[in-house]
């Protein structure tokens, strides 16, 4: 069966510091991968999606970036965090139609 | 533009039936999804509708009318553990990109 991992689970970072969140998927090959952000009391906002290694599409302009160095690895990064980057970051994968979410990383920028 | 509307909050009684509505306006349509999200956790997949009609899965059913841009999630025999946010999402067509509504927070009372 397929499993999706994210780490860390929680993170507190100062404004201006860098960020690296990692997501890995097990049990499937060539999945579509997604990064979402959910601000407090808000819906899920799609940040990036990837259909293959090295293929990244950005949905919204921001100071975040994503990379897919391996088939089942998806990384979300920032060089300098802003206060507005705080939120719940979710990685997801899809095979056929539905998307399955990882456990998420709760990021607080102070 | 892309727009998905659902009520912000609903309250229901344990053992009762509740219907959560969702209306959508999207440029493309490849299916509609319902997810359940408990506080502080990742969303979990509940249902998928791509054709008009009712899909039943145990206590949960989901209905779709593509001509009306309308769906609902029906929860029967409500239990306290059903207290959660219910997210409506539409697959806009390309690469399984989901557009999410802001979610309906359901409170089940004894």
Image (tube, coloured by chain):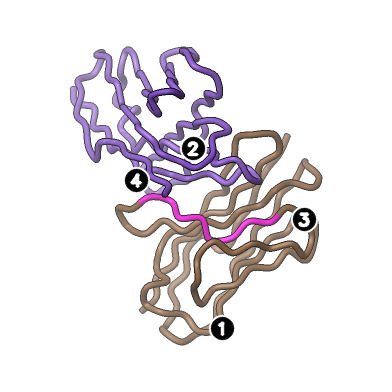
What residue is drawn where x is 68% and y is 63%? A56
Q: CA distance from mark 3 to mark 4?
A: 29 Å
What residue is drawn where x is 27% and y is 33%? B106
Q: Is residue A4 magenta?
A: no
Q: Main secondary structure of the magenta part?
A: strand
Q: CA distance from mark 3 to mark 1?
A: 24 Å
Q: Which residue position holds label 4? A: B102
Give the number of the disc on residue B90: 2
N-terminal of the pair, mark 4 or mark 2, is 2
User: x, y percentage for residue B87?
Assistant: 40, 38
Dot 1 falls on a residue whose secondary structure is: loop
Chain where mark 3 sits: A
Q: Nearer the viewer, residue B75 or B52?
A: B52
User: x, y percentage for residue B34?
Assistant: 45, 31
* Chain B shade in the render: purple
What residue is drawn where x is 39% and y is 25%? B71
Q: Which residue position holds label 1? A: A79
Dot 4 falls on a residue whose secondary structure is: loop
Give the number of the disc on residue A52: 3
N-terminal of the pair, mark 3 or mark 1, is 3
* Chain A shade in the render: brown
Dot 2 falls on a residue whose secondary structure is: strand
**Same chain, marks 2 and 3?**
no
Q: Nearer the viewer, mark 3 or mark 1?
A: 3
Dot 3 falls on a residue whose secondary structure is: strand
């Amino acid at each position: 069966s397929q499993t999706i991992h994210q780490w860390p689970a929680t993170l507190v970072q100062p404004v201006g510091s860098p960020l690296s969140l990692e997501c890995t998927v097990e049990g499937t090959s060539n999945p579509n991968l997604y990064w979402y952000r959910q601000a407090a009391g808000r819906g899920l906002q799609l940040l990036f999606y990837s259909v293959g290694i090295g293929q990244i599409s950005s949905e919204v302009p921001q100071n975040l970036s994503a990379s897919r160095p391996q088939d089942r690895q998806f990384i979300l990064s920032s060089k300098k965090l802003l206060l507005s980057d705080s939120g719940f970051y979710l990685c997801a994968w899809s095979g056929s139609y539905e998307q399955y979410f990882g456990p998420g990383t709760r990021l607080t920028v102070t | 533009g892309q727009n998905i509307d659902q009520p912000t909050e609903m309250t229901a009684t344990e053992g009762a039936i509740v219907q959560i509505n969702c209306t959508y306006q999207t440029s493309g349509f490849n299916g509609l999804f319902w997810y359940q999200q408990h506080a502080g956790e990742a969303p979990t997949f509940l249902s998928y509708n791509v054709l008009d009609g009712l899909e039943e899965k145990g206590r949960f059913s989901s209905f779709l009318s593509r001509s009306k841009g309308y769906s609902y999630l029906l929860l029967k025999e409500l239990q306290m553990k059903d207290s959660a946010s219910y997210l409506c999402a539409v697959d806009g067509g390309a690469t399984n990109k989901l557009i999410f509504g802001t979610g309906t927070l359901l409170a089940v009372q004894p």
